[in-house]
Amino acid sequence: MLLTSIKYILQPILNQIVTNRPLFLLAVIIALSSCSSTQLRQTNKKIQLAFEDEKYNNQFTGLLVVDAQTKDTIIAKNSAKYFIPASTTKLFTLYAAIKVLPEKIPSLKYVESKDSIYIEGTGDPSWLHPYFKDTIALDFLRKTDKTIVLHLTNFDDEKYGPGWAWEDYQYYFSPELGPIPLYGNVVTLYEANTLAVSPTEFTSSIKRAETNKLRALTKNEFSVPKILKDTIQIPFITSPELTKKFLQQKLNKEVLVAQNFNNKSKNILYGIPTDSIYKRMLYESDNFLAEQLLFVVSSTLSDTLSFNTAKKHVLENYLSDLKQPPRWVDGSGLSRYNLFTPESMVVVLQKLYNEVDKKSLFKLLPAWDNNGTVVKPKPMDKHFIFGKSGSMGNTYNLSGYLKTKSGKVLFFSFMNNHHMRSSKEVRNSIYSTLLEIHETY
């Protein structure tokens, strides 16, 4: 009897739905859209209110979140203001390299004459690098029976980027830069019964001592603890003489040095896959790889290795639509002279997303959580933040892609400058904000 009564009440309603099905569906869509918009406004308001917390009073914060599909702005705060980007600068370096470089990195330029082969570097950072251990160019040179003539004057930059802290000269994250970097321009040391040193050339220049100075300021003299618990790397001072010496040792043949290059058309020898360098740069936030990649970009565009050549080409040809042109002075973000806006970061993220295969892009970018970059992530579907962080004293930023529970992809740039809180506290604030958006959008 009850079921009959319910059917009697609902039947006219069901008849109306069937008769006016398109209108009914439209009404449902509008209702759902209204709920979604209301929820989005509530989330936006909640995040904006969170920025009024006293922990944000004495720092400068910017955030921009944009829907990848609709291009709608989800939230914006100081998004057109300039911030010190730190290592999020590497996203610009990544985009520059992807736009200019081929699938395999140009490793060496050379010209052959009857009895000589003239060579010059492209800035390729992988030669004998502690991680890549690449020998492609060296194997090529070993096979020739011609006299090798080395040209090193095509490097049109300084060994350090503008505004880099001078006292970082002894730390692994600040190696010197150059046209043919060997061994990553660092001495690698670890315990293996005795102290293992690479390159072995520096074995006699190392002493065991408890000291805060790992290397002398002006000499390749190194000091390491009596007991090494981990592998350490210390930048060495480069020079044309040292480059020549290393090459002669590895090739087991004489290398001549010339001030001028042969004028004939140059051939290019290609090395390891460029995406392997991109991934290492992003996962390890490797400053050396970032800087050298832009020299390779410059070498691809011209006969000289110059950061400014690479930057000018990229800004004029691929990023001329930026509303706030950046002050971009290096490839790694080590310099506090760099100034970028969250909006510019999001533009580059959008271009990468539109121009690079999605699977490849998300393999290059590390996952991120409230502990920072996840170098060895759990299954990819368990993460929802992929991007590049950037930190230095009183600065912590994160820019990348946010995957929401509803399946949307969002571009975001969250920048924090001049904070007096710990980086852990700032990371937690970033994470809680992005988690809120992930859950509700």
Image: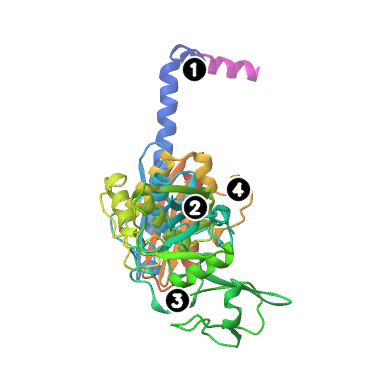
Task: Look at the magenta stretch and give its main secondary structure.
Answer: helix
Q: Position of residue 393 (x, y in %)?
A: 42, 72
Residue type, numbered disc 3:
Tyr
Mark 4 or 1, nearer chain start: 1
Quarter residue 165 falls in: bottom left
Mark 2 or 1, nearer chain start: 1
Mark 4 or 2, nearer chain start: 2
Choose between 265 and 95: the one closer to the eye: 265
Instruction: Measure the alpha-carbon separation of dots 4 and 1.
Output: 43 Å
> Is residue 125 in view from this perspective?
yes
> Above or below — where is 69 with respect to 429?
above
Circle number at residue 382:
4
Q: Which residue is mark 1?
A: 13
Q: Which residue is mark 2?
A: 278
Q: Which residue is mark 3?
A: 169
Report if the CB atoms under discs 4 and 1 are less than 8 Å apart: no
**Which secondary structure lies at badge 1?**
helix
**Which secondary structure lies at badge 2?**
helix
